[in-house]
Every structure is written in structure tokens, then in C-alpha cells.
Amino acid sequence: MRVSIDTEICQGQGRCFSIAPSIFDFDELGNGVVIGDGTLSDETLSLARLAQSNCPEHAIFIEE
Amino acid sequence: MTDKKPVKDFATDWDHTDPKWVNDPYPIWQDLRERCPVAHTDRYGGGWFPSTHEVVSAIANDTEHFSSRLVVVTNNKYPEGSPPAPIGGAPPITSDPPFHALARRLLLPAFAPGPINALEPQIRALCRRHLDELSGEQIIDAASQYAQFIPPGVIAHMLGFPSEDGEIFRDFVHVVLDLIDLSPEVRAPLFVPMGEYFDQQIADHVAHPRDDLTSYLLNVEVAGEKLSPEHVRGTMVLILIAGIDTTWSAIGASLWHLATHPEDLARLVNEPDLMPLAIEEFLRFYAPVTMARLVKDDMEFAGCPMKKDDWILLGFPAANRDPEAFEDADKFIIDRTINRHAAFGLGIHRCAGSNLARLELRVAVEEFISRYPVFELDSSKDVTWAQGQVRGPRHIPLRVPV
């Protein structure tokens, strides 16, 4: 399972790294970035899903 | 303003300065969502108001058919001296692609979470100072004696303007955002003092450069060239105007909510971990900001025959109340966990100051409820809401524990 952010869609709304700072960080422009390669465990999957369902731009994708 | 005809049907004659809309727009938007969903008006030279999340989002994301050249609806679509698209008078908010990305990139690092979060101690101290000044008073106005002081103080600091000029900034905001209904001839001269003030600040920063946003904008280079004076001034106007009324409205609306919903106030006082969810719900439910667009060319869009230079009043607050997009959309749920709200807009014009706005809102509410864990509306004075594209309470009389 892996999470990614589509950088073409992300506008830096800032929800993902506030909700799930263990999975997401921000770059110097304030856009969201995935920490590491985005691999999710059973424990982090629900947190990633929560961030995904709060992204106003629908920029977060999860491969299961 | 007083000679305007009251609106009989908002579907065919909307006016966001009509008292009904100003006092309680939510039932109007709900009615429009069920009947239209894109309302029309001949006022302001003609325009459209989409009331659903779907159409608001479609327009916000469609920079091919809609321009941001002007983002505040007035009676003048062609103001003299305003730079044309794709730059506009206050880049990047008034800019279109491809220029927009360049102007925005210059600003974003200053408003990214890193530098913004570093301001927290200062914002907290500012809030405490204003609360200290109210100590001993039993009746306070949470808008005019508290909320309205927080954003100007922060913005003055960022731009390197004198901190005591807050009242001057609020006058500028009033001209730009509230007095939209005046004729162009009456309105234009009101902008003169603002222009002079910015000229003075720019001259002072040229003579005495320092570590602030104004000096940064004056010196930053793009492709080996400094920004034009119009660009620098336009961006400073944007930061000042967009950073003050908006956040002050969000703080005020949140405190008004807590004053009128004691159960939510008690929960927030007793469960401080709820704060992040509560902040997002305040932003969704009371989203203060509505932006405008202009139709680029004649076309049919969402079933509407749009004409070149028709206004679009882009109601992000209405999108936030759309039951198609939110469960129990008209219910304030302080611990709402799924909340894809559009309070900061959608697409490339996402509010550049959103990290700052969230921080100010959170700290201002935290400090207020820590000082006053209990408070309620005082009936001696009316709560009044600002008209126009930034909605928030301008007076919130409260009875607080001494």
C-alpha cells in the first residue's frame, strides 16, 4: 500500500501535513509532500485515508 | 446605497449587499441550490452566482474561461489605471496564467508553514496584550475590541509598516471591500490616500531596507529584473487587504458561535485536543470570503448564456453548505472529521495566506477562551454583520466574567 500526492493538483491547502504529520510534510512553497516512499502499514493506512478525505483538491492517491 | 431596490427574487436579481443576504444568506443559497443552481443579476453590469459546490469548484478550476482580473464585484468592470490581464492590479490574486504562477511563487515561501509557525509566540503575545486591556470589564465587544486588532498587527509586522497604523489599514479595507456600491466617480478618489500611504512606505523602505516583505518585494529579481513598481505596490495592497478583514471575520464569527452555543464552548474548553477539528469547522461553516471572476468570452456554461465580462460571484461559503458535498451541511459539528471545505478557495488561487489565517484564528480563539472560559451575548447592543464579499460580525457584545 502506498500513498502519493499529485503535485499538479496539490495547491498547498495544508490539510494533509496537519492531519498526518507522520506521513506528509511540506516543501518551501507550502505544498504537501509524502515523507519517504509513501509505503503505508495497516496502522498508517487509516490516517492516510483521513488526510485523503480532507484534501479539498482531491490530490492524494492511495494504491492498495 | 439606500436608493437600491430590495431584491424580490435572488434567482434572477441577486445582490450580495441586500440586507436579507447580509443578515442571513444561508436560506437564500439553499433556495438557489434547489431552483437554479446558478443565479443571475443585471445589477453591477450583469453577473452570475453559482450556489453549488460542483459549479463553484468547476469555475475556480477553469482559468481558461474565467479571469481573475477583478476579484471584487463593483459597478466598474474597467477601472482606470488597472493593469490588464494576465497581471491585474494586485498580483497574484488578480493574475491569470501564465503570469500568475510567477507572481505567486515569489510570495509562497514567506507564507509557507515554516516561517508562519515561527510567528506563533508573537501572535499569542498580541492577543494577550489586547485581552489584558479589557481586564475588569464586564461587557466587551469581541469584534471591535479584540478580533479586529489581531490581523492588522501581524500584517503590519510582516510588511514592516508601523504597528500603530492598524486603523489606517481598516479604513483602506472599508473602501476596497465595503464601499463597493458607489459610482466609479465617487469611489475612485477614496483610493488616493491608500496610494499615498503605500508610496510613503515604499520610499521609506528604499531609503532604509530591512528584513521584511516590503524590502523583499522591492529587491527580488525575476529573470534578472526587479519587479515593476506597480507589481510591488499591487502585491502589498493584496497582502494588506486580503490579510485583515478576512481573518478578523473568521475570528469574530468563531467567537460569536461560541457565545451562542455554550455546549460547543464548554467542549472546546474541556477538550483542547478538539481545536484542530473545530478550526476547520469554523472555517467551513462561517467561511468569510467570496471571490469574483470575469467571464472571458461569450459562452454557455452550466446551462447559462454567459457574456464576456459578466461577473461571477464565486461563493465558497455557499459551496461549504452544499448538502451534496457535506453531510448535515447546515449543522455545525465541532468534531467533524471529514471536512473538505473550500474556505480558502479551490485551484490555483488558493488563499496564499491560509497558513497564517489558520494560525491567527487558532491562537486568537485559544487565548480568548483561556481568559474567558464562559461568556455569552449581551443583549444591550445588536450583532452586526459586514456586507460585501467578506462576511463577519463587526460587533459582538459579550458579557464576560470579571
Image (cartoon, coloured by chain):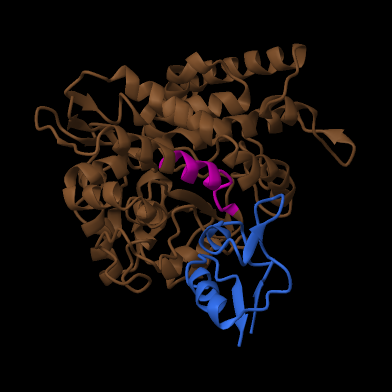
Chain colours: A blue, B brown
Please indicate whether residue B14 sits to the left or right of residue B231 in the image.
left
Q: Is residue B350 magenta?
A: yes
- The N terminus of chain B sits in image quarter: top left
Write the residue at 54% across / 78% down: A43
Residue B210, image x, y percentages: 73, 20
Name the residue at 28% across, 46% down. B269
Q: Identify the residue at the far right of this view.
A: B224
Q: Quadrant where the C terminus of chain B lies?
A: top left
Q: Quadrant of residue B331?
A: bottom left
The magenta stretch spans which residues? B349-361
Along the horizontal axis of the image, is B361 left or right of B229?
Answer: left
> What is the residue that sits farthest to the bottom in this orientation?
A64
Viewer-nearest residue: B141 or B337:
B337
Depth check, front residue: B241 or B366: B366
Task: Name the main secondary structure of what is drawn in magenta.
Answer: helix
Measuring from the top left, give residue B128's x and y in whole percent: 39, 26
Of B18 and A8, the residue lying toward us? A8
**A1 shown above or below B357:** below
Q: Residue furthest left?
A: B379
Residue B367 visible here = yes
In the image, A27 versus B348, the foreground residue is A27
- The percent coordinates of residue B361 (x first, y second) are 42, 41
Q: Is residue B81 among the parts visible in the rendering?
A: no
Q: At x 55% / y 73%, what residue is drawn? A: A48
Q: Is residue B111 above or below residue B32?
A: above
User: Residue B236 colored magenta?
Assistant: no
